[in-house]
Image (tube, helix red, strand yellow):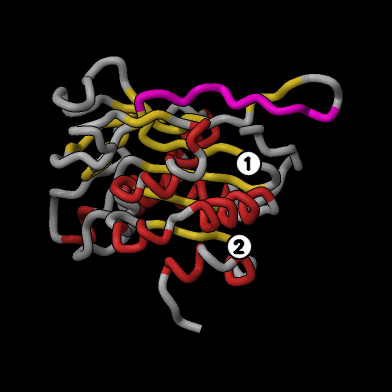
Amino acid sequence: VLGSFQQLIQNYALLQQYHIIFVPCSNDAALFGLDAQARDNLRMWVENGGKYYVSDWSNEFLEDTFPQYQDFFLESGSADLYGVYDSVGTVLDPELLSWLEALPPGIKDINPKNGGGGFPTINNLPLIETVDNWSGISATPPVMVDDGMGGQVNVGHRVWLEGPGDGWDIPVNPPHPLTVTGQYGCGKIQFTSYHAAEFFDYVGLSPQELVLIYTILEIGVCQQDLPPPEG
């Protein structure tokens, strides 16, 4: 049944029909529906195994629902930047790096399939150019929960990719997270400061699409059922 995103997040029974939810850039039309009930629904859905991916200008859907996990750089009091920036990020995760390194040349560089140069490649690993970042994470604090054995475990964000800002609202140094995933109960949350895909007129996958594919697959399994953080 087709419906609005607002209807989805305000109805837990509808959320239960999905394993993963993507909240792409500029979903602001649904923001007025992100009320207390919708936030509770999303947290319960993720706690029970849902996978929740949010990108760039839709950051409110992450920050308002899971505020313990990250802080954002602000411009005029908002995490939505008025200007966009590209960032040459560094892959921090060794397994992601190995996967990218093992890809065939035709996937690493899509320019020959698209009439020449102009598109980012992954020929300079561990560096990856991300195109059109519209927000920036300033911090990923630890989020501690009971591990069931008398100790504590950090379920806060894992940083997969970090890079410099634009030098205006987001500093060039130190580098800031561009791609993160965290655990909430049995589910996962994910955020990228850049679009899932920026270009629309090409054959193949851009570097940021490849990173998204890998991280979406990585968050697809409940590896350890932990309690959600308090508060």
**Rendered residue at 31%/60% (across/down):** 204
Mark 1 and mark 2: span between their CA atoms? 14 Å
**Rendered residue at 65%/33% (across/down):** 229
**Rendered residue at 47%/71% (across/down):** 7
Expressed as whole percent of the image width and height from the top left, the position of residue 102 reads 47, 42
Secondary structure at badge 2 equals loop
Q: Amino acid at mark 2?
A: His
Q: 41 and 118: which one is in front?
A: 41
Q: What residue is disc 2 on?
A: 19
Q: Nearer the viewer, mark 1 or mark 2?
A: 1
In the picture, measured across the screen, residue 168 lies left or right of residue 205, that is left
**Residue 126 in view in this figure:** no
Q: 85 and 92: which one is in front?
A: 85
Expressed as whole percent of the image width and height from the top left, the position of residue 55 reads 36, 48
Q: What residue is disc 1 on?
A: 184
In the picture, measured across the screen, residue 188 lies left or right of residue 137, that is right
- Asked if the magenta segment contains residue 156, the reply would be no
